[in-house]
């Protein structure tokens, strides 16, 4: 028993020494996108329709936590020590909710909770959020699609898809994330401009 205890003690001591022998431990860095806050919603008396927004979906590789880069159109890479602090899909969903609230086009805008107390439902997909390391220089690409459905009739009343590319002037991850924020802001703005005017009885529209 005594011999076994001594063996365990020496083993633990060896583990404690290992970081000093092999260099310091490297910890992950965490990032989040940073978009400017939308303006206060305008006062509109003609807005009567209500809207719920489902959480945006994304390809599985974009939801694994690591920031994504591509060395070629076919090769997907992940930064081992640079990760998202917030799920990008949740971030995009919240940003779209805020933009719709700021537009004043709807009497009420909320996240979709399964209730049928709203007129329209918006579903979306984050298609791309990645660093591009081919075709010369370093870039980021953001691609988003969305569609709005009348909850009563099931008809699609609005759709749009956008893709934006931004140049990164410094090849390090903080600079990449900063440009992702700028490019995401432009993509969401383009996706929702003009915002669907269903609250005032306009017809179905399709974005550029």
Image: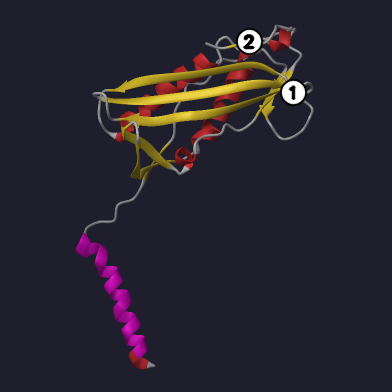
Q: Secondary structure at mark 1?
A: loop
Q: Which residue is mark 1?
A: 154
Residue 194 % position (x, y): 57, 9
Q: Is residue 20 magenta?
A: yes
User: Image quadrant of residue 71?
Assistant: top left
Q: Which residue is mark 2?
A: 205
**Which residue is drawn at the image coordinates 56% and 15% (left, top)?**
192
**Residue 96 badge:** none
Near mark 1 (Cα within 10 A), the count class, few <14, some 14-19 or many ≥20, is few
What segment is highlighted magenta in the picture? Answer: 4-22
Depicted 33 relative to depicted 3: above or below: above
Task: Give the main secondary structure, helix, strand or loop, of the magenta stretch.
Answer: helix
Q: Nearer the viewer, residue 83 or 146?
A: 146
> Are discs 1 and 2 less than 8 Å apart at CB?
no
First-in-chain label (1 vs 2): 1
**Which residue is drawn at the image coordinates 44% and 43% (left, top)?**
65
Left or right relative to 193: residue 164? left
Q: Is residue 158 magenta?
A: no
Residue 91 % position (x, y): 52, 32
Q: Nearer the viewer, residue 12 or 118?
A: 118
Q: Secondary structure at mark 2?
A: strand
User: Image quadrant of residue 172?
Assistant: top left
Q: Nearer the viewer, residue 164 or 47?
A: 164
Residue 54 % position (x, y): 64, 31
Depicted 20 relative to depicted 3: above or below: above
């Amino acid at each position: 028993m005594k011999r076994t205890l001594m063996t365990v003690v020496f083993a633990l001591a060896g583990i404690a020494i290992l970081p000093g022998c092999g260099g310091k431990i490297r910890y992950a860095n965490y990032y989040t996108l940073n978009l400017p806050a939308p303006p206060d919603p305008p006062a509109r008396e003609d807005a009567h329709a209500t809207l719920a927004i489902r959480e945006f979906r994304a390809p599985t590789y974009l939801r694994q936590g690591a920031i994504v880069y591509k060395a070629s159109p076919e090769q997907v890479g992940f930064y081992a020590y640079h990760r998202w602090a917030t799920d990008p899909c949740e971030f995009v969903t919240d940003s779209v909710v805020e933009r719709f609230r700021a537009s004043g086009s709807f009497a009420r805008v909320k996240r979709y909770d399964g209730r049928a107390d709203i007129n329209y439902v918006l579903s979306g997909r984050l298609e791309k959020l990645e660093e591009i390391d081919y075709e010369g220089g370093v870039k980021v690409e953001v691609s988003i699609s969305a569609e709005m459905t009348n909850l009563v009739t099931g008809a699609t009343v609005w759709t749009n898809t956008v893709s934006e590319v931004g140049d990164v002037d410094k090849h390090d991850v903080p600079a990449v994330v900063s440009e992702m924020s700028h490019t995401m802001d432009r993509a969401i703005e383009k996706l929702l401009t003009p915002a669907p005017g269903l609250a005032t009885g306009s017809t179905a529209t399709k974005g550029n």
